[in-house]
Image (cartoon, rainbow, N blue to C red):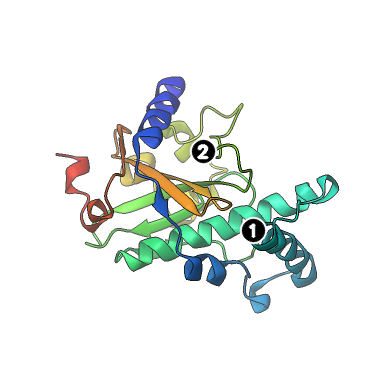
C-alpha cells in the first residue's frame, strides 16, 4: 500500500502545474522571527548561507549542509503557508522555530471554506538539476499508520487521525523559484494541482 501511495503521489506531482514563487513571498520567508528562536545565531548563520545561494549563487559548503537543510525546510514551509493564506486558507499548526526536523506533519491548515483540515508535507531543494524527492527509506510516510503513530506530534496535539484530514504534498524548488503540488482525499487518491482556482474549494477531491 505504501509503495502504491508513493507512486501515485509522484505521478500526480509530475502532472502538476509549476507555479512561480513570487519574489516578495520568498524574501519575506528567508528569515525567521528572532524572538521565536531558541538559538538565533545558529539559525541566522544558516539563513545567510541560503540567501547567499539564492541571491548570489554562492555554493553552501559541504561541512555546513547538515545545519542548513532543516532551516531550508522551514523556509519552504513558510513559503507554502504564505501562498495558501493568499488563497484564503487558514493556518492551524506550523513551526515558527526556524528549524524543521523530526517525525510528523509539516503544516496543518484549513481550506478557504473552513470545512476541511489539510495536512501539508513540504519537500524543498536548492539543487538546480532536480525537484526535491519524497523521503527515501520511509515509504510509510503519509500512510494511515504514519498519521496515527504516537510519534506524530502534530496529529497527537490536535487529536486527529488519518480519517480526519486531507493530504497535500508540495515540492518547493527555491533555486528555480517554482512550486508544484498534489492533493489527496481521506482515501489518499492523489490529484495534481493544475490551477490555483482548485484551492478555493476542495469539493472536487471527493466528487
Q: Position of residue 123 (x, y in %)?
A: 53, 45
- Let me know if residue 94 appears in the view: no
Residue 193 versus residue 114 in the image, above or below = above
Residue 54 marker: 1
Q: Viewed as shown, does residue 54 lie left or right of 177?
A: right
Viewer-nearest of labels 1 and 2?
A: 1
Give the secondary structure at mark 2: loop
Is 25 situated left or right of 112 in this image? right
Snapshot quadrant of residue 133? top right
The spot of residue 54 in percent (x, y) is 64, 58
Label 1: state its secondary structure.
helix
Residue at 37% from the left image edge and 61% from the top image edge:
84
Report the residue that reaches farthest toward the front: 56
Question: Looking at the picture, how far across and down is residue 128, in whole percent?
Answer: 61, 43
Q: Residue at x 59, y 44 (%)?
A: 103
Q: Residue at x 47, y 51 (%)?
A: 178
**Label 1 Cα crowd, 10 Å radius (few <14 / some 14-19 / many 20+):** some
Amino acid at each position: 500500500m505504501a509503495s502504491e501511495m508513493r507512486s501515485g503521489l509522484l505521478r500526480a506531482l509530475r502532472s502538476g502545474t509549476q507555479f512561480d514563487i513570487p519574489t516578495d513571498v520568498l524574501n519575506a520567508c528567508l528569515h525567521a522571527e528572532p524572538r521565536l528562536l531558541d538559538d538565533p545565531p545558529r539559525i541566522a548563520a544558516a539563513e545567510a548561507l541560503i540567501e547567499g545561494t539564492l541571491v548570489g549563487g554562492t555554493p553552501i559548503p559541504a561541512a555546513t549542509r547538515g545545519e542548513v537543510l532543516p532551516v531550508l525546510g522551514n523556509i519552504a514551509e513558510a513559503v507554502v503557508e504564505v501562498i495558501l493564506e493568499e488563497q484564503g486558507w487558514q493556518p492551524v499548526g506550523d513551526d515558527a522555530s526556524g528549524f524543521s526536523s523530526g517525525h510528523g506533519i509539516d503544516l496543518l491548515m484549513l481550506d478557504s471554506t473552513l470545512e476541511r483540515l489539510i495536512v501539508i508535507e513540504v519537500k524543498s531543494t536548492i539543487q538546480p538539476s532536480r525537484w526535491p524527492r519524497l523521503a527515501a527509506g520511509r515509504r510509510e510516510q503519509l500512510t494511515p499508520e504514519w498519521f496515527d503513530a504516537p510519534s506524530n506530534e502534530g496529529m497527537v496535539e490536535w487529536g486527529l487521525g488519518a480519517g480526519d484530514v486531507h493530504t497535500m504534498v508540495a515540492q518547493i524548488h527555491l533555486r528555480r523559484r517554482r512550486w508544484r503540488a498534489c492533493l489527496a482525499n481521506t482515501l489518499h487518491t492523489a490529484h495534481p494541482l493544475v490551477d490555483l482556482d482548485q484551492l478555493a474549494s476542495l469539493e472536487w477531491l471527493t466528487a
